[in-house]
Image (cartoon, rainbow, N blue to C red):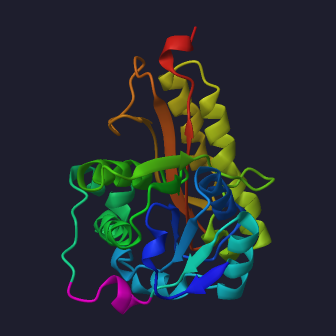
Amino acid sequence: MKITKLLSESAAGCAFVPTMGALHAGHQSLIAKARELSDEVVVSVFVNPLQFEDKSDLAKYPKTPEQDALLAQAAGATTLWTPDYETIYPTETKKLSAGELGSKFEGVHRLGHFDGVLTVVNRLFEMVKPRYAIFGEKDFQQLFLISKMAAELHPEIQIIAAPTVREPNGLAMSSRNVRLNAEARNAAEVISKVLFNAAKAESISQARLELAKVKNEIQFELDYAEIIDEDNFELATEETTKPRAVIAGWIDGVRLIDNMALQPALVRI
C-alpha cells in the first residue's frame, strides 16, 4: 500500500473511502466494500476543521496514524492519502450549504457542521475523481446530504451506503468510542437497546414509545430521538414505508449518534 500526501492522477476512477482517521473495524468494512468494487482503493485521512463548531472537540479528536496504515492495508486499501490543510484548501474556500436539512437533528446541535462536511467532501471528490465513494449508515443524515450533493455536483460518482458495524454490546463503532471508560460503555448500551426494540415495533407510535425509554438512562443526556422518513427526513407517520429511528446524545462528555431502519409500514399487521 502506498502512503502519500500527494495524490497521483492514476487514482481517478477508483473506489474512495474518505475518513478522519482513528480507523477501526467499521472503517475496515467500508474499505473491504470498496475493494469489491475496484482494484484501486483510496482511503483519505483528513480531520476537517470546517465541520467542528467546538474547537476543543477538534483538538480532542483521536489521531492514530500508525494504526490507520495497518488497518487500511489489512482491509485492502491500495493508497492511504494523508493531505494537509493547504492541499485541501489552497485558497479561501466558500462553504457549500446543506440547506434546510442541515439545520435539523444533528444540525440543531452542531451549527454549520454539515456545511463543513459537504464542503470537504466536494473538495475530496474534485481531487480524487472516484467512480465510487463509500460511506457508512451510522452517520445517516450525513449520508443523505452527501448523496444529494453528489447527485447535483458529481453525478458521475456512485455513492455506496454500507451498514453500521457494531461492537459486541451493540454500540455502533465510532472513533469517539475510545474516549468512553468501562462504565460509560455499559451505559451506552441503552442506545442500541432502544433502537433494536423500536425496530421490532408494529407501529410508528409504538416505536416512538420504545425509543423514548432512552430518557430513563440517567447517564445519557439526550439531544434527540425520533422516527423519520428515510426519503426526506420528515417525521414518520404510520403510512411511512421507509421509517428509521435516529438518536443522539452525550455520555460522560462524549457525543454518540446512531440510527436503525424500522419495519416498513406495508408489512406491519
Is 265 included in the stretch rendered in magenta?
no
Residue extending furthest toward the front: 10
Front residue of 42 and 243: 42
Please give the name of the residue rendered at 35% of the width and 77% of the height, measured from the top-left corner: 53
| Drawn side of residue 119 relative to residue 52, left or right | left
Q: What residue span does the magenta drawing correspond to? A: 84-92
Image quadrant in which you'd find residue 68:
bottom right
Q: Please determine whether, in this image, residue 76 is positioned above or below residue 168.
A: below
Residue 85 inside the magenta-drawn segment: yes
Q: Residue at x 39, y 48 (%)?
A: 144
Horizontally, residue 216 falls left or right of residue 231, namely right
The image quadrant that residue 108 belongs to is bottom left
Q: Quadrant of the C terminus?
A: top right
Q: Residue at x 60, y 59 (%)?
A: 220
Query: Picture coordinates of residue 29 (x, y %)?
Result: 68, 56
Asked if residue 222 shows in the view, the reply is no
Horizontal side of 238 relative to 209 (left or right) equals: left
Image coordinates of residue 208 in percent, x first then y, are 51, 32
Q: Nearer the viewer, residue 54 or 9?
A: 9
Residue 25 visible in the shown view? yes
Q: Quadrant of the N terminus?
A: bottom right
